Each structure stands twice: as C-alpha cells, then as structure tokens.
Image (cartoon, rainbow, N blue to C red):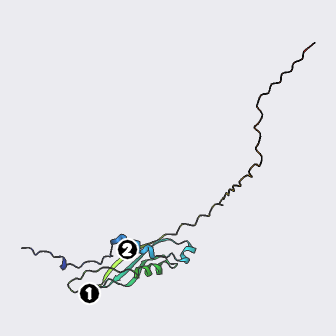
C-alpha cells in the first residue's frame, strides 16, 4: 500500500510574489546603468547567485559571471532588494539558493533633434472702407457716332 503524498511533506522553493515576470519587471525598474560602464560601452549579462533565508529575505549574494565597470555591484544591489514568499516546511529553517540573470543593455543614444521649424501666422484686419466703391465698369463698351450730311 502506497503512502499518499502530501504537499506539506515537500520542501518548496521560494517564489517571488507575482511570478518570474513580476520579478524581472521589478529588477529592471530599479536597475540603474552605471556611468562607468556607459562611458566604457560595456553591455552583457551578469549572473548573480543569492541565498534566501526562511523568511524570504536575500541574505547573501555572489557574482557567478560579471562584467565589471560597476555592473556587478549594481546587480548585487538590485538583487538584495528582492523579497520572496517562502512556504513553511515542517518548521525547518531552510536556506535556499537561486541564480538570477540580469541583462545590461546600453540605453539607446538620444537622437539629435532635427532643427525645428516654427511658422507663425498673424491675421491683421483690413481697415473698413469709408466711401462705397463704384462697381467696376462693364467689360465691353460700345460707342456709336452719327454724322449726318446736310
């Protein structure tokens, strides 16, 4: 006879509230590209391994693969801000290990703005005419002259 597997018998990994997409969104919201790396033109991936205690706090971080130029320190800073949800496991205080990949991509260079052209219109009302104008002469004109011989 097999024993029934119960959920509380297993050691569960910590989860970030909202799932992996929410964790990625949180990381990139708080990530600041280091000015030293920006000046050096460095971009790539930093892999950080972190230790998560039984409360869900990140207690230690280690760089597995780094880039230098301030990117490693920035990645560690952001990972330390994370807070995880940990299910209780039979009263055990378990230390969890998790690897997090953080991509450092140079922000796009600001495009130089094309010279802007501004056009301004001014409407000036014309002065009202004081005397009524005569209608224009007709387009065709006839003249008849008679000469009589007597």
Name the residue carrying label 2: 23
- Dot 1 crowding, Cα within 10 Å, few <14, some 14–19, many 20+: few
Residue name at image x 23 percent, y 79 percent: 11
Q: Mark 1 points at which residue?
A: 93
Q: Position of residue 124 (x, y in %)?
A: 71, 55
The image shows residue 113, relative to residue 65, as above or below, that is above
* Discs 1/2, front: 2
Instruction: Give the quadrant of residue 91.
Output: bottom left
Q: Report the quarter where the N terminus lies.
A: bottom left
SS assignment at label 2? helix
- Crowd rating for badge 2 (residues with CA inside 10 Å; few <14, some 14–19, many 20+): some
Total marks placed: 2
Could you tell whether 75 is left or right of 138 in the image? left
Q: Where is residue 16 in the image (x, y as percent from the top left)?
A: 33, 76
Q: Earlier in the sequence, mark 1 or mark 2?
A: 2
Check whether the beta carbons of the residues at disc 1 and disc 2 lie within 8 A of each other: no
> Gap between marks 1 and 2, in whole Å?
24 Å
Who's the residue at 89% across and 17% down the image? 147
Q: Which residue lies furthest to the front in this view?
A: 150
Image quarter where the C terminus lies is top right
Instruction: In the displayed orientation, state which residue is furthest to the top.
Output: 150
- In the rendered structure, the answer to whether residue 150 lies left or right of residue 144 reads right
Locate residue 101, reporting x and y percent: 40, 73
Q: Nearer the viewer, residue 40 or 126?
A: 126
Q: Which of 86 and 99 is in front in this view?
A: 86
- Where disc 1 sits, the SS reads loop
Q: Which residue is drawn at 40% across and 79% down?
A: 79
At horizontal 76% and vertical 30% (from top left) the residue drawn is 139
């Amino acid at each position: 006879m097999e024993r029934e597997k119960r959920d509380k018998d297993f050691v569960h990994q910590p989860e970030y509230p909202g799932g992996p997409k929410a964790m990625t969104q949180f990381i990139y919201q708080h990530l600041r590209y280091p000015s030293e790396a920006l000046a050096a033109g460095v971009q790539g991936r930093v892999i950080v391994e972190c230790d998560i205690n039984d409360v869900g706090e990140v207690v230690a971080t280690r760089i597995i693969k780094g880039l230098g130029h301030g990117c490693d320190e920035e990645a560690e800073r952001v990972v330390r801000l994370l807070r995880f949800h940990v299910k209780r496991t039979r009263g055990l205080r378990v230390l969890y290990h998790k690897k997090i990949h953080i991509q450092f991509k140079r922000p796009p260079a600001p495009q130089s703005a094309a010279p802007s052209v501004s056009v301004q219109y001014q409407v000036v009302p014309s002065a009202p005419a004081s005397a009524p104008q005569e209608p224009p002469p007709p387009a065709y004109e006839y003249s008849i002259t008679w000469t009589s011989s007597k």
